[in-house]
Structure formats: structure tokens, C-alpha cells
Image (tube, rainbow, N blue to C red):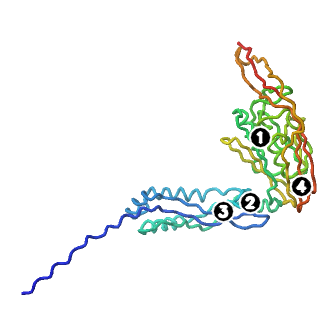
Amino acid sequence: MPVPEPAPATTPPVRVPAFKGPLLINVETTIPVLVDGKKTTVPLTRTLTIPGPRMALIRQSGAVTASLDADLKKFVNGLAGKAQDARFEELWDGWAVVQRNALQIDLAATRANVLAAVQDPRGVKASVVVTGQTAPQRTLDYFLSRGITAHLGTGETNYYGSSDARVTNIHVGAKNFSDRLFEGKTFSFNGFVGPVTSSNGYVTGLVIAGDRTASGVGGGICQVSTTAFRTLYGAGLPTLQRQNHSYQVHYYDPQGLDATIYQPSLDLKFANDTGGALWFQTEWDDEAASLSISVFGKARDFTVEIGKPRTLSSTPSPADRIIPDATLPAGQRKQVDWAAPGAVMEVTRKLVRNGKTVRQDTLKSSYRPWPNIFLVGTGR
């Protein structure tokens, strides 16, 4: 009698762990830019990342869930929102005019791509389907038609320690340089920003008035005029009118490169010798207390070299000054100014073409010695 063969051993099925990789929903396209006066494009890439643990649950459903669909719509709406007017941006290889168009997106086709990735056991990417772009009102042609193709200069200052009132006035003044065209032959700071008055949004702050610091509307506007001075001075424009502050103000380090204004008599003026229009942009960061103003225009055939400020002479600061103030309670003491030595300083600016200096000028500043100033209350 034949011996029956033993039954084959059964091997338990291998359990494949659920795929927990993220899902990357990508949009890849290009947007128009103007580089050195020539139109071209640069890549635009944006990604919505759905984390792996969440995707593991979505993959089990095998569908585009309501929450995933909501995130997808929010992502797409951000891409297809309002087009942004063209303006200069500092890219990885220099300044260029960037025109950020609104993207036209096929949501149904994009959702289908997402569904395919969800149902693919190893799907990690889904593409947003871009069908076109909508241009903003201000395009590359706005700059190209005016010959504004080059970065000419950027000025920077720091306002760390400024009061809330001073910061407000800096914002109000700096907004005048926010994406703004200038087409004249003589740049006047006072003419450009208009009256520094409460009706124009300025508030009361501390201003330098004679031999003391006092309250006045627009205190802090000189932070903007100093920044604008550094911008245009660094761009190589001829200086027509500029006055340094009475004393060395710590906000304006390095010293010797500041400019005060006092309306209507004291102004900051430059000759626009670029042969075309100027375009201004400004940025500020209250957390870093930094303000910058940039100017753009026709490309120049020279570079500007600004030397470090040189101190020709120095005078020690005088003794502390005490000023009675009836607005403070009796006996209260408040410091409103900090001591600074007097100084005579010079800065040399060179315009260099092909390695040779074609123009050179010297900026001179004379600062009075300045004491610590304390207000002492006499009020009741």
C-alpha cells in the first residue's frame, strides 16, 4: 500500500506594511522676468506637502477626502489669486524685474492627478495642471519702455531703540518710496515725500531743535532722509543739497553719511544725471529695526566706490545737561539724549570706469559735541 506524501507546508502570507510616504502636490511653470534689459523667464515651483501619517489614512480610503480636497483648493486658490505687479527682486544671481502672473489652473485635472497618486501604492507626487497665466496691470513693459533696467544703489539704516511714535513716522515717510517712479531732473526729498504734517499721518515724536531735543510732528523722518541719502549717494548721483545733523546720532552709524531735513527750509537734493527715470522700492523690518531704500534706472557704465568715513578731528562731549520739564511729575528724571563727541569727518566717493577714477568728490560733516540730556520733572 503506497505511503501518502506529506502535505506541503503552508507559508503564512507576507504582510506588506502600509506605505507612509508623504504626498507632494507640485506646480512647476515659468514666469516672465527682465534681466539686464532683456525679457526671459525663470522657474516657478511651489509644493503642497501632505505628511506621511496623514497620507497613510487617505490611501486606505482610496479617495480624495474632504479635508485633502479643501487643502488642495486653498493651495490652488493661492496660485490663481490676484497677479502681482512687476517690481525688482534680488534673485540668486542679481536684481531683475519679476512679473508674478496669476496662474490659470484646471482644478478637475489636478484633482484627478491627486486621486491617481492616492490610489497608487507608491504614489508620492501629483502635478498641478497649469493652463495659462494672467498678467498684472504693471508688466515688464512698464520698466522696459522707460529704460529702467538696472539696480543703481541701496541705502540702509537701523532704528533699534526707537519709540513707537518714531517708528510710525519712519513707516509713513518710507511709504513714499514704495514702488514709486520719479521722472524729474532734480530730486528733492521734501518735494517727493510732501508735507510732514499730522494730516499726512505723522505723529508727535522727538526732533532736534537748536541745542536740545524736543517734541515735534514727524520726529524720525530723518531716518528716512538719511536712508534716501545713502541710496542716491551710493548710486553716484551728484549731491546738490545735504546737511548733516547737529551732532552724531547713534541711529546713523556709520557717522558721516547722514542727512537731516527740516521743512520748508532744509532739504535734501540730488541731480538726476542718469538720463532717464528713477524707480524706488523700500523695505523695512521692525523686528530687526532695519530700513532700506533701493533705486533703479538706466544702466550706468561705471561703478561707485565709497570709502570709510575718516575722522579729521574730535572734541570731547560736554557735561550732562539738566532741563526742567513741567510735563513730568516733580523729581522724575528722563534721559532724552546721549552724549556724543564733536567731530569733523570726511567721506570720499569715486566713480570708476574700466579701472580708472573718472570722478571723485569729498563729503564733509561737522558735528557739535553733545551732552547727555535729562529732563527733570517740575510738575505736580
Element at label 4: strand
- Mark seen at residue 94: 2
Residue 197 sits above or below residue 288 on the image: above
The mark closer to the camera, 4 or 2, is 4
- Mark seen at residue 173: 1
Element at label 1: helix
Q: What is the distance, in whole Å, between disc 4 and disc 2 at their CAs?
A: 21 Å
Q: Residue at x 87, y 39 (%)?
A: 311
Indicate the position of residue 70 as horizontal and vertical percent values: 48, 56
Disc 4 marks which amino acid?
Leu
The mark nearer the N terminus, 3 or 2, is 2
Indicate the position of residue 210 as horizontal and vertical percent values: 86, 27
The answer to whether residue 359 shows anywhere in this view is yes
- Res 300 → quadrant: bottom right
Q: What is the distance, in whole Å, between disc 2 and disc 1 at their CAs?
A: 27 Å
Front in this rendered view, residue 220 or 361: 361
Tag 3 residue: 134
